[in-house]
């Protein structure tokens, strides 16, 4: 009789060990899935924040340009969004006749960036502002009636934005 009780105890201990292994495996699985989905969620929030930075940049620039009257000048502090290597300005190639507006010529030799902007302008000819990403992809921004020579900035700088009739001219502010 005592032998039978000892065998039952031994069997119940073996069952406990196997159930503990199952609990540990399940806990490890839950923890690893939580970490995996947490990392994905953090990356998603980071990408959403970057998208909001682009929208904020675009809206800020458009509000300054659209709020400008004829013969008015504004100094604009250009802040390059995070994740952007350069901001380039290149107004429409077709400028109205009789106006003293800068002309955008993408003919700088030795600059790869002009190739990417030319490709983007062939798809979006009305684009005048281009955000250049580190992988050389281009995000165009359409701002009607904005004219500029081909200028690029890879750091924050001050721009002089001038209203000329119904057109707007952007140039680097000379101190």
Image (tube, helix red, strand yellow):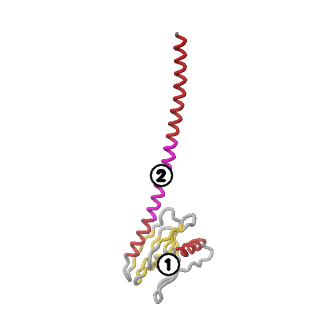
The answer to if 38 sits in the magenta stretch is yes
Q: Is residue 5 above or below residue 109?
A: above
Answer with left or right where residue 150 lies relative to residue 74.
right
Q: Residue at x 48, y 88 (%)?
A: 97
Q: Which residue is mark 2?
A: 42
Q: Is residue 27 above or below residue 87?
A: above
Residue 76 x/y as whole percent: 42, 72
Q: Which residue is mark 1?
A: 91
Residue 88 x/y as whole percent: 51, 72
- Label 2 secondary element: helix
Question: Magenta span: helix, strand or loop, mainly?
Answer: helix
- Label 1 secondary element: loop
Q: What is the quadrant of residue 169 in the picture?
A: bottom left
Q: Residue at x 48, y 54 (%)?
A: 44
Q: Which residues are magenta?
A: 32-54
Q: Residue at x 50, y 40 (%)?
A: 31
């Amino acid at each position: 009789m005592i032998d039978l009780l000892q065998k039952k105890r031994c069997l119940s201990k073996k069952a406990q060990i196997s159930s503990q292994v199952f609990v540990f495996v399940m806990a490890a699985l839950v923890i690893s899935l939580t970490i995996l989905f947490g990392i994905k969620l953090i990356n998603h929030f980071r990408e959403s924040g970057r998208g909001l930075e682009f929208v904020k940049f675009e809206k800020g620039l458009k509000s300054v340009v659209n709020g400008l009257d004829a013969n008015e000048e504004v100094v604009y502090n250009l802040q390059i969004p995070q994740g952007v290597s350069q901001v380039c300005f290149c107004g429409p190639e077709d400028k109205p006749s009789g106006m003293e507006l800068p002309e955008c010529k993408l003919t700088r030799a030795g600059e790869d960036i002009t190739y990417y902007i030319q490709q983007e302008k062939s798809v979006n000819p009305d684009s005048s502002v281009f955000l250049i990403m580190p992988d050389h992809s281009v995000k165009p921004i359409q701002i009607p009636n904005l004219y500029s020579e081909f200028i690029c900035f890879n750091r924050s700088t001050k721009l002089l934005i001038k209203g000329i009739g119904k057109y707007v001219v952007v140039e680097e502010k000379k101190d």
